[in-house]
Image (spheres, rainbow, N blue to C red):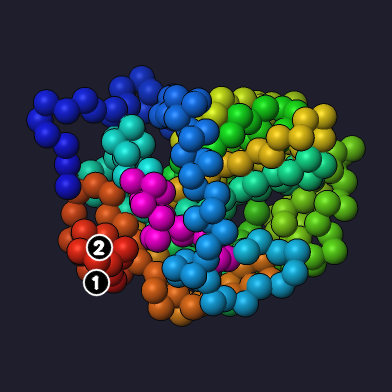
Amino acid sequence: MGNPADAKTFYLSSEEIEQFHRDGYIGPFDLYEKEEMEAHLQALRPKLLNTKKAIYGGGRTVSGTTNLANYDRHLDIDFLADHITRPEIVDRVSSLLGPNTLCWRTEFFPKYPGDEGTDWHQADNFSNVAGSKHPQIVWPEDAEFGGTITVWTAFTDATVENGCLQFIPGSHKSMNYDESKVMEYNSENINKVEKNGVRRGFFGYDYRQLQKDPNWSPDESKAVSQVMRQGQFIVFWSTLMHASHPHSGLTDQMRLGFAARYLPTQVRVYPYSTELEEFGGDASLAKFGNVLTSGEDTFGHNRFVDRTVTGHPFRTR
């Protein structure tokens, strides 16, 4: 992997890296022109509806829950496979994680008119929504931190009115939640939970069940709204306190975000799991593999997919 010596690079400057470590996020950055992203989105819609090649297409889902069939669609859709390896993204991720990186998960986050906002939350090892309660990612014991780098791309415009992201700068340095606690799924809570006068939920979960201090609440006076035009992306730690506004319903436009999650290759991915269990659904991880996005893997404890094999969208190795 790697770019030709004369290719344009997008590595973060020392000032940008310092800003990221201070705030927990950086961006937004331009990736696609608005018209270009809209054309990609129109071509993408029928492919997303066809889940026959999706690696979780045979998984069990419960009515009203997140559909696992639309996780990790970069493994069967060429545009998304190219997207997660774009140098505009990977160079910046490598600036933060080091030269050897992988993408372990992608997810779509649609928000329709009238939908609630996503509740304030942090994610370190992602065990909180896993039915098995196993951590989904495991950093080395001597690591100074955990979590994952999330690159969130606006596939449509993201505004306060239609539910853009919110961050609390600097909040990534300490966890306010204990992911070893049980967070119970209840589909009947979707779009029905109100917190501090704002409709906020978490896809059928209530993050208050994980709070280390039951009397604590986020300081929303420090929140910053991340307005993004269609085709831009932003980079943030999963341990950053983040949320989203409700969709006001004042516009009929759906807000669609696409999140790609990155790690250095020494981090173990799904080390204790044979199934992905989230949001009331489950699916086998038999076809899952990470994508090497920069450098090389010298550890050998993760499975990877190879999309360069002729005639195969991916192959695990």
| 51 lies above or below 77 | below
Q: Is residue 144 visible?
A: no
The secondary structure that dominates the magenta segment is helix
- Residue name at image x 77 percent, y 30 percent: 251
> Which residue is label 2 attached to?
306
Q: Which residues are magenta?
A: 68-82
Q: Cβ–Cβ below 8 Å for labels 2 and 1?
A: yes
Residue positioned most to the left: 5
Q: Which mark is residue 317?
A: 1
Indicate left or right for 4 with 219 as reference. left
- Residue name at image x 71 percent, y 72 percent: 62
Indicate left or right for 25 with 199 as reference. left
Q: Based on the displayed image, in which of its 4 quarters is residue 112 positioned?
A: top right
- Residue name at image x 79 percent, y 65 percent: 187
Taking depth in this image into account, of 256 and 292 the one nearest to the observer is 256
Residue positioned most to the top: 15
Q: Amino acid at mark 1?
A: Arg
Q: Identify the secondary structure beneath mark 1.
A: loop
Q: Which mark is residue 29?
A: none
